[in-house]
Amino acid sequence: MIPVKICTSSHPALRKTVRPIEQFDRTLRELVQQLREVMVAHHGVGLAANQVGFNLALFVARPKEKFYIFANPELQLLGEPELREEGCLSVPHKWGLVKRAPKVRLTYHDLQGKRRTLTATGLLAQIMQHEVDHLHGILFTDKTTELWDIHDQTEITAATSTE
């Protein structure tokens, strides 16, 4: 596999709307494996394909122990938005407050191309909103009501994993 690097906030790939996935094949499964490895290596809970330079409507998530794969996601927000703390692998050492819906419904394709729907709350709902934003060229810093610097990556991981 080709090693991949996370694009940081100034990278143009992060500001483009991605294209839908049309082929659900071995190449896609290999990309998912790369996304998973990069996300885990960087202690993330979600990673969109464009964060590693691939212009595809795809993201992975792992809020706890379960690993999720979402291709061609369509997001429906449910409930009144609440302020949540958030960070991003593409915006290192920054953390902020973002308004996110407490519940979402995501329609997506699985790795076999089958259309599915998942309703989520809590951290998974927050990850889904964050990653779908990425797929539309939006960074969490575009939505923050407050932004601060954090230089200890373990603080970010601990804050994210306890929710």
Image (tube, rainbow, N blue to C red):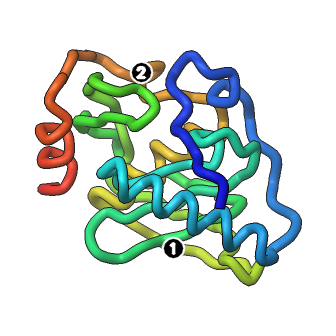
Q: Quadrant of the C terminus?
A: bottom left
Taking the image as shown, residue 44 lies to the left or right of residue 53, namely: left
Residue at figure coordinates x 67%, y 69% from the top left:
30
Taking the image as shown, residue 12 lies to the left or right of residue 20, namely: left
- The relative height of residue 100 versus residue 96 in the rendered view (above or below) is below
Residue at figure coordinates x 74%, y 35% from the top left:
17
Disc on res. 90: none
Residue 161 appears in the figure: yes
Taking the image as shown, residue 87 lies to the left or right of residue 156, namely: right
**Residue that numbered label 1 is attached to:** 118
Q: Amino acid at mark 1?
A: Leu
Furthest-right residue in view?
Answer: 22
Image location (x, y in percent) of residue 67: 42, 73
Q: Amino acid at mark 2?
A: Thr
User: How far separated are the C-alphas under marks 1 and 2?
Assistant: 26 Å
Residue 79 appears in the figure: no
Residue at figure coordinates x 12%, y 56% from the top left:
162
Disc on res. 141: 2
